[in-house]
Protein backbone atom coordinates (compact mmCIF):
# COMPACT_ATOMS: atom_id res chain seq x y z
CA UNK A 1 0.00 0.00 0.00
CA UNK A 2 2.91 2.36 0.55
CA UNK A 3 3.52 2.60 -3.17
CA UNK A 4 -0.05 3.85 -3.71
CA UNK A 5 -0.21 6.38 -0.87
CA UNK A 6 2.40 9.11 -0.92
CA UNK A 7 3.25 11.27 2.07
CA UNK A 8 0.81 14.12 1.27
CA UNK A 9 -2.07 11.63 0.94
CA UNK A 10 -1.29 10.09 4.32
CA UNK A 11 -1.09 13.56 5.88
CA UNK A 12 -4.49 14.48 4.39
CA UNK A 13 -6.00 11.24 5.72
CA UNK A 14 -4.71 11.95 9.22
CA UNK A 15 -5.80 15.61 9.17
CA UNK A 16 -9.27 14.67 7.90
CA UNK A 17 -9.72 12.05 10.61
CA UNK A 18 -8.45 14.37 13.36
CA UNK A 19 -10.73 17.20 12.24
CA UNK A 20 -13.69 14.83 12.10
CA UNK A 21 -12.94 13.57 15.61
CA UNK A 22 -12.59 17.14 16.92
CA UNK A 23 -15.87 18.15 15.29
CA UNK A 24 -17.53 15.11 16.80
CA UNK A 25 -16.51 16.11 20.31
CA UNK A 26 -17.10 19.84 19.84
CA UNK A 27 -20.46 19.62 18.08
CA UNK A 28 -21.67 16.50 19.83
CA UNK A 29 -24.36 14.30 18.37
CA UNK A 30 -26.43 17.06 16.80
CA UNK A 31 -27.70 17.88 13.34
CA UNK A 32 -24.28 19.28 12.44
CA UNK A 33 -22.83 15.82 12.90
CA UNK A 34 -24.56 14.75 9.68
CA UNK A 35 -22.78 17.53 7.82
CA UNK A 36 -19.44 16.58 9.33
CA UNK A 37 -20.02 12.91 8.50
CA UNK A 38 -20.88 13.85 4.92
CA UNK A 39 -17.66 15.81 4.51
CA UNK A 40 -15.70 12.93 6.04
CA UNK A 41 -17.31 10.39 3.70
CA UNK A 42 -16.57 12.55 0.67
CA UNK A 43 -12.93 12.75 1.75
CA UNK A 44 -12.79 8.97 2.17
CA UNK A 45 -14.38 8.50 -1.25
CA UNK A 46 -11.78 10.78 -2.87
CA UNK A 47 -8.97 8.92 -1.14
CA UNK A 48 -10.33 5.55 -2.28
CA UNK A 49 -10.71 6.90 -5.81
CA UNK A 50 -7.08 7.99 -5.81
CA UNK A 51 -6.02 4.57 -4.54
CA UNK A 52 -8.04 2.80 -7.23
CA UNK A 53 -6.53 5.04 -9.91
CA UNK A 54 -3.05 4.29 -8.63
CA UNK A 55 -3.64 0.53 -8.74
CA UNK A 56 -5.15 0.75 -12.23
CA UNK A 57 -2.24 2.85 -13.48
CA UNK A 58 0.23 0.31 -12.12
CA UNK A 59 -1.57 -2.55 -13.89
CA UNK A 60 -1.71 -0.60 -17.17
CA UNK A 61 1.98 0.22 -16.93
CA UNK A 62 2.84 -3.44 -16.40
CA UNK A 63 0.73 -4.45 -19.40
CA UNK A 64 2.30 -1.77 -21.59
CA UNK A 65 5.78 -2.89 -20.56
CA UNK A 66 4.83 -6.46 -21.43
CA UNK A 67 3.58 -5.36 -24.87
CA UNK A 68 6.76 -3.36 -25.42
CA UNK A 69 8.89 -6.34 -24.42
CA UNK A 70 7.03 -8.63 -26.83
CA UNK A 71 7.33 -6.14 -29.68
CA UNK A 72 11.11 -6.00 -29.20
CA UNK A 73 11.39 -9.79 -29.49
Image: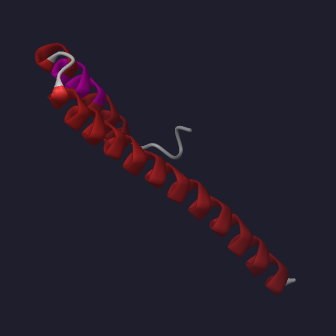
- Left or right side of 43 for 29: left
- Res 6 quadrant in image: top left
Q: In percent of the image, x 67 and y 62: which residue is there?
A: 59
Q: In percent of the image, x 15 and y 30: which residue is there?
A: 32
Instruction: Reply above or below: 14 against 28.
Output: below
Instruction: Reply above or below: 38 against 30.
Output: below
Percent x, y of residue 37 = 29, 33
Q: Which secondary structure dominates the residues rendered in magenta?
A: helix
Q: Residue furthest left?
A: 26
- Tell me if residue 27 is in the magenta stretch: no
- Left or right side of 10 for 39: left
How many numbered discs? 0
Q: Residue furthest right?
A: 73
Q: Quadrant of the C terminus?
A: bottom right
Front residue of 46 and 30: 30
- Tell me if residue 22 is in the magenta stretch: yes
Q: Residue furthest front?
A: 31
Range of residues picked out in magenta: 17-23
Q: Quadrant of the N terminus?
A: top right
Front residue of 29 and 2: 29
Percent x, y of residue 3 = 53, 44
Q: In percent of the image, x 18 and y 19: which residue is there?
A: 22
Q: In percent of the image, x 74 and y 80: which residue is there?
A: 68
Instruction: Reply above or below: 48 against 54.
Output: above
- Res 16 quadrant in image: top left
Percent x, y of residue 50 = 44, 53
- Res 60 quadrant in image: bottom right
Front residue of 63 and 29: 29
- Left or right side of 2 for 45: left
- Left or right side of 26 for 24: right
Colouring chosen for the image of the structure: secondary structure
Amino acid sequence: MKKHFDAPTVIIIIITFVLFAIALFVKGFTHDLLLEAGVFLISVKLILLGYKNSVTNSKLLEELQEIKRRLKE
